[in-house]
Structures are given as structure tokens and as C-alpha cells.
Amino acid sequence: MSTPATSASGTASVASPPFSSAPVSAGPSSATRGALAAGGCFVLWGLFPVFWKQMQGIPATELICHRIVWSLLFLFAVLAWQGTLRGTFAVFANTRLVALNALSSVLLACNWLIFVWGVNNNHVVECSLGYFLTPLCNVALGCAFLRERLSRLQWSAIVLAGIGVAILLLRLGHIPWIAFGLAGSWSLYGILKKQSALGALASLTVETLLLFPLAAGWLVWLALRGDGALGHVNLAQHGWLLSVGLVTAVPLLLFGWGARRLRLTTMGLLLYINPTLQFLIGLFVYHETLETPQLWAFACIWAGLIVYTADSFLASRQVSGSPHRAR
């Protein structure tokens, strides 16, 4: 998923990629529009399993290559329309930013690949678990790598999530690598993005540009072998393939617009729309099974998220009510 000053993970401590450089002072109407935009973003992300299922017969690696190529072209068009395309290329004069974006592009590609493979191999529920775990994983990594101090409630949330993970490991008999891979890759991606001054669109453009040679090369090689999807799938799947750039960028634009107009705690609540929809889709649309150990694990992780969200809400109330807050 692929966010978030607030992120698609929604944490107050370790944000995923920054979507705006400065907040917009928002009145009630602006906040409402922001909530609609951000909510729309999370709904679209939550519906991603349905989108990728339309291309289930196409290998995940090929789908990700298409996503990189068509996303880059769409992002070029958006940045050109905004008049910021030339400025985006200036990033390549900064070795540190290039290195950061090279690392983050690898994590992003891994996250995309794990998710698409998981969805198209009937692991939608486990994918949702990964994104439920992400906020708590962000907090844990913030403590480990950024030396951020955790409150008692945050520690409690991590312990509850840890119990849920332990149940999965002990009772299922295998490592839920899809969930761990999604949570770990997105959280590490967020840590790297916290070190970058780039906005979301510019950042994603640079990342997809760095990945483009490999992605385009792979697609050309498949085409030369006669194994590529283009020209060999039905008309509807051609349409889905060509729309992946649009589907990738539109939620990002909505998130960036909404994040500038909403409080962090509001974003933190809205972000759960994404994994909740994925969980429900996996369970009721694709009829995936939910074993008892998984249910107990989900219950522990959900309890941890409730504690974590309550802590974020209380912290926000304390900051907003402080007589010494920054003017």
C-alpha cells in the first residue's frame, strides 16, 4: 500500500511517505472535504484486491512491471500538468536523495509484489492482517531505529500484537510471511521516507523511474519470448493492465489532498478502512477460510490497535489543550 507526516500506516511516530510539505489550515468545510478525499483513498486501497483479481492469470512479477511502467507515464503527465516535472529531475543532483529513493523503491516493489501475489493466490485475509499490523510495526521500528520513546499504552499495544503474532506462529504451524512481508516492507519504507524531503508524487515518480529500466526490460524480454500478457489476454484484461498507473496515482492524490486538511488522529482512524475492507472482501467475497488461531490472532491485534488509537487520541487532546503549544 501503498503512506504517511500521517501515512497509510497512520502512525504518529513513524510516518510513511510525506504527502505534503505544509499543512493547510482547515475550517469545518475544508476538514469535511479532506475527510471525504482521504476516506475515498482508503476505500480505493481497500478495494485493490478486487482490481488485481481481474488479472489473476497474469504472473505477479509481470503485473508489477506493468504497474511501474504505466504509473511512471501517468505521474509524468500529472507532474507536467502541475509544472513540477523539471524540478523533480533535480533530485538526481542530490546523491543522498537518490540513494534513499533507490532503497525505498526496492521496498515499494517488494510490498507491491507481495500484495499482488497474495491477492491472486487467495490470501486476501492475510494481506489485510499485514496492514492491520503496520501501525504497530511502525511504532516498534520507530523505537528500535529512531529511538522514539513509547508510552505505556503503546507498549501495551505492541505486547497485544506480539501475542497475536505468537498465536499465529505456534498454532498455524507456518510463518505468515505475506502479512509479515507487507507490514515490514511498508514500515521500513516509511522510515526511509521520513528522511526524505520529497512530496509523495515526486517521490513515487523518482522511485518508479529508478525501477523503470528493470521493469521495462522484463516486459520487453517477455514480449520477445511471446510470453507477455499484452496481445495474449482478453480485451477487458488489457484495459485493466493499462489502467494500473491511474489506479496507483489517484488514491495517492486523494490522500495527499486530504492529509493536508485533517488532524493526524482523524487520519489514524480513517486508515483502518483499508485493511477492514480487504478483510471483509477476502472473507465474504472470495470465501477464504478463517481458522480459529487466526481469529484469536486478529482479536489480539485489533485490541492492540484499539489501545494504540486511544493513545494517539489522548496524546492529540493533550497537545491541542496545552497552553504552551506552538503559535
Image: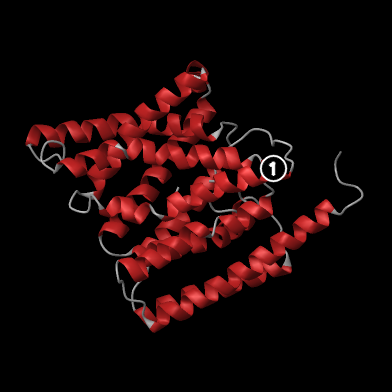
Vertical position of residue 319 compared to residue 158: above or below: above
Taking 52 as reference, is 202 left or right? Answer: right
Taking 323 as reference, is 101 left or right? Answer: left
Q: Residue at x 25, y 51 (%)?
A: 54
Q: In the image shown, does 12 or 321 lie closer to the viewer?
A: 321
Q: Is residue 7 visible?
A: no
| View extreme (left): residue | 226
Q: Quadrant of the C terminus?
A: top right
| Amino acid at pointer 1 | Ser
The quadrant where residue 309 appears: bottom right
Q: Residues within 10 Å of mark 1 (few under 14, many from 20)?
A: few
Q: Position of residue 269 (x, y in %)?
A: 61, 58
| View extreme (right): residue | 323
Q: In the image shown, does 211 or 230 lie closer to the viewer?
A: 230
Per the image, the residue denoted by label 1 is 29
Q: Is residue 108 visible?
A: yes
Q: Position of residue 75 (x, y in %)?
A: 42, 29
Vertical position of residue 78 compared to residue 124: above or below: above
Which color mode does the image show? secondary structure
Q: Residue at x 32, y 49 (%)?
A: 113
Q: Residue at x 72, y 60 (%)?
A: 313
Where disc 1 sits, the SS reads helix
Q: Position of residue 140 (x, y in %)?
A: 59, 60
How many callouts does the rendering have?
1
Taking 273 as reference, is 209 left or right? Answer: left
The quadrant where residue 69 appears: top left
Vertical position of residue 76 compared to residue 2: above or below: above
Q: Residue at x 39, y 54 (%)?
A: 47
